[in-house]
Amino acid sequence: MPRVFIFANSFTAKTISLSINGILNKHIDEVMLLTENHEEYEFSDLPKDIKVRFFDNVEQAVLACDIVLICITPNIPLKKISFVKSVAKRMDKHLIVIEGVWNNGLENEAPSHFNNIDSSNCIVILNISLCPEAQQFNGEILLNRLLSNNNISFKQVFSPTTMDILEQFNEYQALNPNLAKHLCTVAEHFDVTVLSITLSKLKNTLKYSNEFRPDYIIVQSDFRGDSIAEIISLLKRRFNISYDFLIKSHYIQLENSIPFQIYCNQKIELTKNTYDLEANDLSLALEFDLLSKIALPDGIKRL
């Protein structure tokens, strides 16, 4: 099985690692990381089919891998990035470079054709991120896998940040085809539409969208969950409903000149319909709850 060395900051490496076998068009057996950049406890809850190995230097990690994945963020010196690239080329490794990961300035842009969604003709799943530390990217990849595996006809409108990252993977012809087919914006009919958006952009967009009404709502928050009360209030006022499923990450943001994510190695308090992003039972729990609520009996059509 292919092995991938991820050269990135800790937040990016963890986010990519959690969904690596949903992102790439190859099944990854092992993820390689540098000891100097990561704490081992942060990667203790990866999917069971992925092993994590830590290396003391770049040369060892590149030698042991098949794919070198570099994720460029502002807090990684360009000199180090150039060095990793040179080692990968010298050892003739498959090199993938993703730029502007979660620092591309797209967080508060609305997904394309948001206002063109006709919620009267299809089921709408709304995925709301309360902040960048919520790791919405993982929720989007998970939704794609669940719906694809259940052979559901759907169109997925990715958040602008996720769209940018996936398009870069696609340029290397490395993207999972179940994701790649949703990069196209050709208008077609689907039974289900999946829409991902940030809370701040959702509030602005709803001012101009009177017809939009979601059928199933997923909220993703950081470890603190400071904005959960705000989204509950917004959904109540606008739709007279609450969210269906809450996913919390283990990250919070440390305010600095460059946003810095801190991993909280503590158990997430689980209440009704609240789940840990890194829990092994998240996928099964979301699949059961989602499909039980959006499925219609045979012969029954949506009004």
Image (cartoon, rainbow, N blue to C red):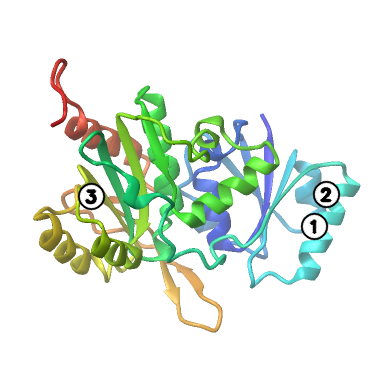
Q: Which residue is mark 2?
A: 88
| Mark found first going from the N terminus, 1 or 3 | 1
Q: Amino acid at mark 1?
A: Val
Q: Is residue 213 left or right of residue 110?
A: left
Badge 1 vs badge 2, beta-carbon distance below 8 Å: yes
Q: Is residue 187 above or below residue 110?
A: above
User: Dividing the picture into quarters, in which one does residue 145 lie?
Assistant: top left
Seen from this angle, which residue lies furthest top? 299
Q: In the image, what residue occupies the spot 25% across and 56% down?
A: 209
Q: Disc count in the image?
A: 3
Disc 1 to disc 2, C-alpha distance: 6 Å
| Mark found first going from the N terminus, 3 or 2 | 2
Q: Amino acid at mark 2?
A: Ala
Q: In the image, what residue occupies the spot 52% across and 38% down?
A: 184
- Numbered disc 3: secondary structure: loop
Q: Which mark is residue 73?
A: none
Q: Is residue 223 above or below residue 20?
A: below
- Numbered disc 2: secondary structure: helix
Q: Nearer the viewer, residue 190 or 259?
A: 190
Q: Which residue is mark 3?
A: 212
Q: Looking at the figure, which quarter contains the C terminus?
A: top left
